[in-house]
Amino acid sequence: MNTNDIRINLPASKSMSNRWLMINHLTGGHFRIGKLSSSGDTRLLRRLLNQLEQHTSEVFYCDNAGSVARFLMPMLALTSGTHILTGDPRLQQRPMAPLIDALRQMGFRIECNEREGFLPITIQGGTPTKRTVQVDPLLSSQFVSALLLVAPILPDGLSLTMTGRPTSRPYIDMTCDALRLAGADIRRSSNGRTYYVQPYVGKPKPATITIERDWSSASYFYTISMLRPELRIRLLGLQLDSSQGDSATDTFFRQLGVISTEVRSPYRAAARSITLQGNGIRAKSIQFNCIDCPDLVPTFAVAAAAAGVKTILKGVSNIALKESDRMQAIANELSSMGANIECTTSEMLILPSGLHMPESGIIHTYGDHRIAMAFAPLQMIFPELIIEAPEVVDKSFPEFWDEFEKCKTF
């Protein structure tokens, strides 16, 4: 082990943590979850699940956590009583219609209180009258995952057909893998569009589930490694072989000269960490499809602009529907630094240009954790750059600034 490595403690995967919290709740708490994410979203989901258990309020306020709202919606539909699902103004702008429509197909009563297809909604808990459902996964894979998570507790299981190509398919695969580990019988049709889920048989065996470290959080340190190739950064607990879609970080950054190397122990089968180091060798141009990893678009766009490498990011149509309009946020903030960036509804083109400090000296983060963390590495070349509202990182990586500071001060 190189004692000069900068050792970065990544959080556990928020996506995996939230899926296992849901599974554990639905199966009666048979699983012991180790290394649960410390993210704000995971803490929120735990609190709302406890609220559901304790019957303390009929109003479930999800802040700006799209996955929390979408995961809770089918569960509330199955829980007797009247429930109101809502969130902050941004969450009330984010799409929910495909999931609402799917639950209505199944016979559940859901009323949109203000705008059709958006929160807030009122849910009358009950039982499904149909075991087949169609759902459009184009805007979010979470619509599919939300239904799959509750499928094994439905009296007759569920047959779910996707009406199109899903965004972020690896997240659906992650849901299926977790459910199978919990004892669910899930099969997929030969064309990959339909999932057949049988009810749980008996009670699952108690087991300890260890959550992987988070690849989304790792991506920001790849940008640092690209900008500071003299550093050796060790990402503790991370593995290259991962079911997380955002492990595509490694593939993208290899084209920007960042090499990932697994650190293994002769006494353990799994890698215990990976090290990053830049070699300065960059591709002349990059074309990358982000449809399976849209959360990485801010990171990739900032890194490409800083590297001065012509880059086309494809499959970005749904990033305008995230915690902020990320398409507009990225374009605004990179343009303020002199970047030449062109956006269409489905692609982002970053052309080589020299970055400079924005006139204001500030990166606006639009209340979005991923915008804050994607732009933070630029402080390596612009130390006076100010990241507005740095506390927004609490949503996914509360310890980000402490870990980031290790690299800044090395």
Image (spheres, rainbow, N blue to C red):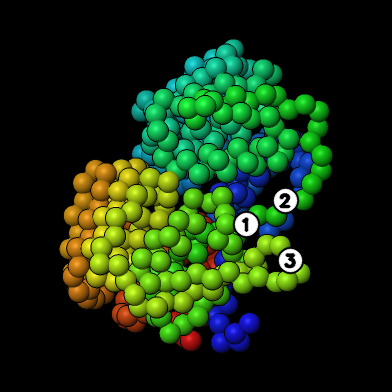
- Looking at the rendered image, the disc whose residue lies closer to the viewer, 3 or 2, is 3
Q: Quadrant of residue 349?
A: bottom left
Nearer the observer, 268 or 130: 268
Q: Which mark is residue 268?
A: 3
Question: What residue is pinned by disc 2?
Answer: 209
Q: Residue at x 56, y 50 (%)?
A: 243
Question: What residue is pinned by disc 1?
Answer: 212
Counting residues from the N terminus, which is met first, the one under dot 3 or under dot 2?
2
- Mark 3 Cα shell of 10 Å, populated few (<14), some (14-19), many (≥20): few
Q: State the image coordinates of residue 102 (x, y, percent, origin top left).
A: 48, 23
- Mark 1 Cα shell of 10 Å, populated few (<14), some (14-19), many (≥20): many
Q: State the image coordinates of residue 108 (x, y, percent, origin top left).
A: 54, 18
Mark 1 residue type: Glu
- Mark 2 Cα shell of 10 Å, populated few (<14), some (14-19), many (≥20): some
Q: Residue at x 63, y 41 (%)?
A: 177
Distance Cα–Cα, label 3 vs label 2: 17 Å
| Vertical comparison of 268 with 41: above or below | below
Q: Tag 1, which secondary structure? A: loop
